[in-house]
Image: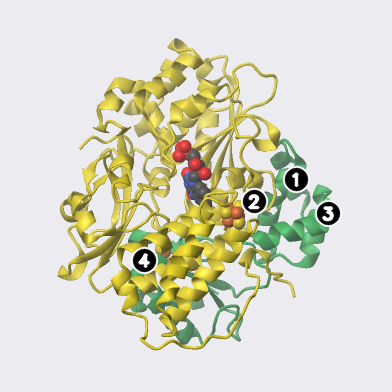
Chain colours: A green, B yellow
Amino acid sequence: MFSEAELIEIEKIKKRYESPQSSLLPVLWMIQEKEGWISKDSMSYAAELLNIPYEYVLGVVSFYTMFFKKPKGKFHLQICTNVSCMLRGGYELYKYACKKLGINKEEITSDGMFSIEEVECLGSCATAPMMQVNNKEYFENLTFEKFDELIEKFKKEI
Amino acid sequence: MTKIILKDIDDLNTLEVYEANGGFSALKKVLKEMKADEVIEEVKKSGLRGRGGACFPTGLKWSFMPKVTDKPKFLCCNGDESEPGSFKDREIFERNPYQFLEGTLIACYAMGIKTAYIYIRGEYYRWINIIEECINQLYKKGYIGKNVAGSSFSTDIYIHKGAGAYICGEESALMSSIEGQRGYPRVKPPFPAQFGLWGYPTTINNIETITNIPEIINRGSKWFASVGEPKHPGTLLFGISGHINKPGVYELETGTPLMTIINEYCGGVWRGKSLKAVIPGGSSVPPLTRDEALKAKMDSESLKEFNSAIGTAGIIVMDQDTDLLEVLTRITYFYFHESCGQCTPCREGCGWMLRILRRISEGKGRMSDLDLLISVADNIEGNTICALGDAAAWPVKWTIRKFRGEFESKIQKEEIELPNINKVHSIRHTDYYT
Ligand SMILES: Cc1cc2nc3c(=O)[nH]c(=O)nc-3n(C[C@H](O)[C@H](O)[C@H](O)COP(=O)(O)O)c2cc1C
Ligand code: SF4
Ligand code: FES
């Protein structure tokens, strides 16, 4: 799966830690960056690469919510509904988004563009309601209008 | 108001401006003029207490690290910041990252540490990039790596990116996560200073704690000890969210009255409404009633009076129309979702509390449910490996105690027959691949 350059990168990462197993999270991050999610095959690959049992890798992947166990839409929308966001309309935004896109949790729009997830506090409580996209960029102080604009913008990006 | 971290200096987040404003003078002073022990002594005298929630004296924690050992020693800077209502470390990464890194270097020097890991929650993609860039700059400038600032002291700093798990902010779970494992907390003792990362001596400190260090060295422990409340000196980065006009992060001295923060700094409760309740330190601490909020001062000692705590200083403001049952249910869902599942009281108890709260919301509550909730909470508290159990129990126990009338009003007069169900619950134990 990994290119020569990426394998060199992994060797560098391994040197940061006292045990090779510690590179598992960084390696899983690299896999997800490449593939968009972490499949069983990817887990076998990571296990072989670091010389640890497959079951062990499975245990780690299933523990962390940011590792995707299933493919997601091109734009995976992560809307916080935890308490501070809830007080400022987090649920309203989540419901609005589900309705607008016609999907629920764990579902992907038929064109493969969007998937949605309700997430826990992202440290953006003062700028609620908010949404993270693809584990990366934050969009804060959202309104329904701003959300609509973002969706249009994402559609054009493809 | 004294500023120690979020100073009013434009572009302080760039290395040039940071250096032009005295940046790295504390590091240089320490390397040239102070022995490692003297640095620890200075931090002890300053009275600095951890900003990660437990308020443990930082100098004392540092002094637990073995001085003479042939084992490697480690520092973990805790930037997991996942407690609902907390968003202060992010502000440090953004506005004063170099002071944090300078503090990290001084901490390493004081404890004879050659490797530090900065654990940052995976969601903080943007802020991870910022810190990574800062670290690169400092390697180039010779502040990190071999012979720090030309001295005989060498140390490396690495970022370890989390992957979505609140529990990894708990210090022993954080170490598990760095070791490439599920984020399981470990039984203490042994404490990290004896048996930490890979079994070696390790110290874990919050980002804000460490960011205070350069100013303690620059301005002296006496000065620091004189800022704010003597028993909990310094400033705190208060993160204010919820029903408030000007939410955000405010650096204010410890002991500042809560209502001063709400009214003078944050423009009061939003939409001209009155206050119902305030959570003063992140979702895990017991709430304050309006009357308590009017009297409360924001430091660890003063809040004890109201059976609450300063936690991470994340203040969540709730107006008169807030449904506290809804708030408590959402908070409980969070702890249920984040329980790592190792201890039965936490894993099952969080699920029980959630189901009881939900059934009250659905109009199927009984009067006895309120005492049942408190009893489940009491049975979690103190009976678990880590403090997540307590963090889940406190809000339930104290919100019901302090606002019992509101909960009672949600319960129908007539009792409803309920089916018996018992299912083992823990989101982190679910097989996602079936
Ligand atoms: C469930 C749980 C979550 C925690 N999350 C964090 C966190 O995100 N950041 C943090 O600094 N401390 C967190 N802590 C506290 C740490 O265990 C530890 O006390 C702290 O990092 C020590 O740093 P300090 O002494 O500088 O405060 C958490 C504790 C528990 C029980
Ligand atoms: S208290 Fe909860 S989170 Fe902590 S170790 Fe036990 S089950 Fe895990
Ligand atoms: S509660 Fe939503 S970001 Fe904190």
Task: Respond whether the residues carrying marks 3 and 2 are from the same subunit.
Answer: no
Query: Which secondary structure, mark 3?
Result: loop
Report the residue at 51% width, 64% height from top: B376
The dot on residue B400 is 4
Residue A112 at what x, y percent from top left?
A: 61, 80
From the viewer's perspective, is the residue at label 1 or at label 2 nearer? 2
Report which residue position mark 1 lands on: A21
Q: CA distance from mark 1 to mark 3?
A: 10 Å
Tag 4 and tag 3, C-beta contact below 8 Å: no
Task: Respond whether the residues carrying marks 4 and 3 are from the same subunit.
Answer: no
Residue B316 at what x, y percent from top left?
A: 32, 59
Is residue A38 visible in the rendered image? The answer is yes
Say which quarter of the image contains residue B266. Answer: bottom left
Relative depth, front residue between A82 and A95: A82
The dot on residue A53 is 3
Tag 1 and tag 3, C-beta contact below 8 Å: no
**Any atom of ligand 2 within 8 Å of the CB at mark 2?**
yes
Relative depth, front residue between B182 and B13: B182
The three-letter code of the residue at mark 2 reads Tyr
Looking at the rendered image, the quarter that the C terminus of chain A falls into is bottom right
Residue B304 at what x, y percent from top left?
A: 32, 45
Residue lying farthest top? B33
